[in-house]
Amino acid sequence: MTASDVNRGPAGPDDGAVGRTPTGGDGPADRKRPSQRLYNHPAAGWGAAKSVGRVLVKEHAFVDGPRAVFRMNHENGGFDCPGCAWPDDIKGLKLDICENGIKHVTWEMTPKRVGADFFARHTVAELSTWSDFALEDQGRLTEPVVYDAVRDRYAPISWPDAFALIGRELRGLDSPNEAAFYTSGRLGNEATFLYQLMAREFGTNNLPDCSNMCHDASGRALQAALGTGKGTADLADWEAADALFIMGVNAASNAPRMLTALADAYRRGAQIVHVNPLIEAAATRTIVPHDMTDMALFKSTPTSTLTIQVRVGGDMAFLRGVAKAVLEESAHDPKALDHEFIGRYTFGFEDYRALCEATSWEQLEEQSGVPRADILKAARIYSASDRTLVSWCLGITQHEHGVDTVREIVNVLLLRGNLGREGAGPSPVRGHSNVQGNRTCGIDHRPTPDFLDRLADACGIDPPREHGLDTVRTIEAMNEGRVKVFLGMGGNFALAAPDTAYTAQGLRRCALTVHVSTKLNRSHLVHGGKALILPCLGRTEKDHQRRGVQGTTVEDSMSMVHLSVGMKKPASPHLLSEPAIIAGIARATLPGSRTPWESYIEDYDRIRDTMAQVLLGFEDFNRRVRLPLGFRIRQPARELAFLTPSGRAEFSAAGLPDAPPPGDVIVLQTMRSHDQWNTTIYSDNDRYRGVSNIRTLILMNGEDMRARDIATGDLVDITATARDGSRRRLKRYRAIEYSMPRGCAAGYMPEMNVLVAASDYSRQSDQPLMKNIMVRVTPSPQQ
Ligand SMILES: Nc1nc2c(c(=O)[nH]1)N[C@H]1C(S)=C(S)[C@@H](COP(=O)(O)OP(=O)(O)OC[C@H]3O[C@@H](n4cnc5c(=O)[nH]c(N)nc54)[C@H](O)[C@@H]3O)O[C@H]1N2
Ligand SMILES: Nc1nc2c(c(=O)[nH]1)N[C@H]1C(S)=C(S)[C@@H](COP(=O)(O)OP(=O)(O)OC[C@H]3O[C@@H](n4cnc5c(=O)[nH]c(N)nc54)[C@H](O)[C@@H]3O)O[C@H]1N2
Ligand SMILES: [Mo]
């Protein structure tokens, strides 16, 4: 059976798929007519409570679910929500939770199990015809399995044999660089540290991770501008800001606990500006979920004072417009700029000023898609605010000019000295719960020489110095036979990565693919000649080791590091923790290793003692991480010390991106629905956007639809043209009219990764252009 054979649904990719589209229903996604009611419900509140109830019932998690939820994100003894990376409430709020976090936790706590009998019943060819939803819905993986090519089935294997198999394959490679070690941002800090140590002791920096698709643009921009790869604001700053700019994030779905911060900000009279092509739920109103009076009275609080519907990819021009307006104002109001701050702490201001002055309002309007009057409104809010914070997520980063756009955010902040003081600064919203910690603890295919030196000193290894492969380069290398072993620590590489067919082909060309996972997913079915699935403990589960129950640490979006201790009985007695799996692989791969792998696993404090020697800001790690809220990693930029070439915060003066594409080309952005976690789909609904029963859709501007003779509900074909001229197509998607600027469209990841060419990545950040796909949309031919 070939890849495209399995695409039998009425809506499905033309080319490039590796399986049925993920769907929460029991059949093809659009068997039922899609319905789109544009809800006017406030975000969170009772709608969210109802949705959580449904999930708890579905996962039969009524007994453990509520108990676990009350232990989540607690300052003492709880586990960190494995969902998003929003920080925990600093006042120790007792119900610091959200609908999607609860869904996420109960997803992990399902009583359903996938054991040897399951794999005996189903061939891989058969499982490949299942929807992605159906695969994960089978429940938790319970024992290690190995692919048996003769029977086309996975079969049980012991842990020692599994490790030995990996060790043999890795040691048999011509070069350590023929292996790639992928991380999804779930992995705790201790496992992360061991994982990169194993890869580097083995001899490679091939450490692709989900950040390569997520926030590398933010990291690179902030590093260049401020000498730190992270935001400088923390939750206390969110509580003190006079103006908050929320750019390119769907907070109500993807960082729901931000809603509380926005509602609080509104109540104290702060200005909240949302910049997004869509008017997302967080840009309307919310019922604060833990405010019982609000819940009881259905009382909602607005969460926006201004919404700017920017063109997809138009943010940099918008921001430059704000800067231009502030500079114009400074001609008659000296207080418009913070001259003292600019003079003392920044570098490159005059070049930036000249560039803003030389850019015409016409160009800014055309590229941003925002009328000058609206840019001026936003600029007035910015000028009137003493303390401004800018937050952003993927709408800013997954673009060709993601790095320049984040630098433009910093430029705007610097003009009025919004850095290193209360209520101000850049504050990116990170994705996976520990994606920021992964980078801090060494998952980086471009490690700094300084980091490698400290690693070498503390661990007595000789790490390779040349840069390794990122996500996109790994896909290319697998296809070209340069990478032969792929190891995935969590995640679902086959679906999350761009260019689904090409990625699948790469994975299939590997000699060995290994996935450390909690649930069955597509990546297990798109496998190499040899393949292993290794099941691990989830974050909610008790991790018993020789010296007692172990906790692992995580770092949130705002650089707070704290301990997370699982409390649930493991889903199966055969599960190992992620650190133990890594240590097992390391021992089998590095027979002469002097790293104390076994001792590390007996007591994770020992891993943390080594980490304290290697990682800056982790001094006295074991003690500080046991403080009630953990600790914040010290950040020089927050204290106005800048580790940049000039020793100052650096303005950038980059040219604006290209104008909107000509002709009938539409810029398509791919995003998440409310009911999904990346490649995990909970249902076919997207409540806040008023969509139900469908994921195979494309949201479009009404005039664009009429110009193409398309009405809401019509079937359309979407053809993407890559930079190299190659084409990728999705057929028979439903078009739905939605409020957004002309020339823009939106649809769901991961299905639409079929359209993203692997070669179309940003030359600035190397991130695939997942929000910048050039497409033509045409009515589907009658069948
Ligand atoms: N429940 C839930 N929570 C999650 C996740 C999940 O899948 N489910 N995923 C986690 C991960 S890994 C991440 S990285 C984050 C992702 O969090 P988000 O960044 O919110 O993720 P997306 O769903 O991709 O939404 C992108 C948003 O940017 C807007 N946008 C698109 N293009 C542009 C543009 O050019 N300019 C501007 N200004 N806006 C634009 C879209 O309309 C949308 O509102 O969420 C994390 N949290
Ligand atoms: N088109 C498009 N594509 C995108 C994006 C987009 O916006 N548009 N966003 C990108 C972004 S931001 C990201 S972060 C990536 C996400 O990419 P990934 O992180 O690779 O994907 P996930 O869907 O988060 O991974 C889900 C799987 O993780 C495993 N898992 C869950 N919990 C655990 C655990 O505790 N331990 C282990 N070992 N495994 C676990 C389960 O088996 C589950 O099936 O997708 C990227 N892809
Ligand atoms: Mo992400």
Image: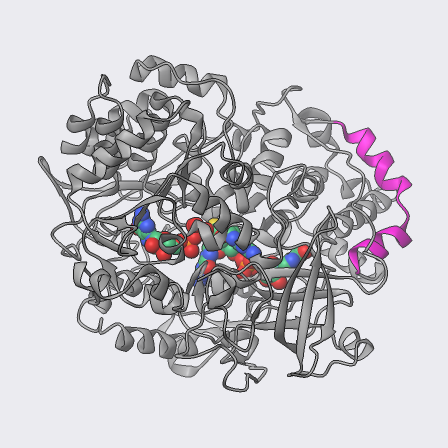
Q: Quadrant of residue 120?
A: bottom left
Name the image colouring.
Answer: one colour
Image location (x, y in percent) of residue 60: 22, 74
Q: Is residue 304 visible?
A: no
Residue shown at 78% from the left, 56% from the top: 368
**What range of the chain is rendered magenta?**
348-369
Closest to the observer, 61 or 231 = 61
Quadrant of the rendering where the N terminus is positioned = bottom left
Residue found at the far front of this picture: 150
Q: Is residue 40 above or below residue 726?
A: below
Residue shown at 30% from the left, 64% from the top: 107
Residue shown at 27% from the left, 27% from the top: 589
User: Where is ligand 1, by quadrant?
Assistant: bottom right
> Is 173 contained in the magenta span?
no
> Is 363 contained in the magenta span?
yes
Image location (x, y in percent) of residue 52: 34, 73
Numbered label tally: 0
> Relative to residue 241, is residue 405 drawn left or right?
right
> Relative to residue 352, is residue 64 drawn left or right?
left
Which secondary structure class fits the magenta region best? helix
Q: Is residue 565 visible?
A: yes
> Relative to residue 548, is residue 267 drawn left or right?
right
Q: Quadrant of residue 10?
A: bottom right
> Relative to residue 582, is residue 225 drawn left or right?
right
Image location (x, y in percent) of residue 512: 35, 40
Image location (x, y in percent) of residue 590: 26, 23
Residue shown at 26% from the left, 63% from the top: 69
Quadrant of the rendering where the C terminus is positioned = bottom right
Closest to the observer, 260 or 461 = 461
Closest to the observer, 593 or 403 = 593
Closest to the observer, 204 or 606 = 204
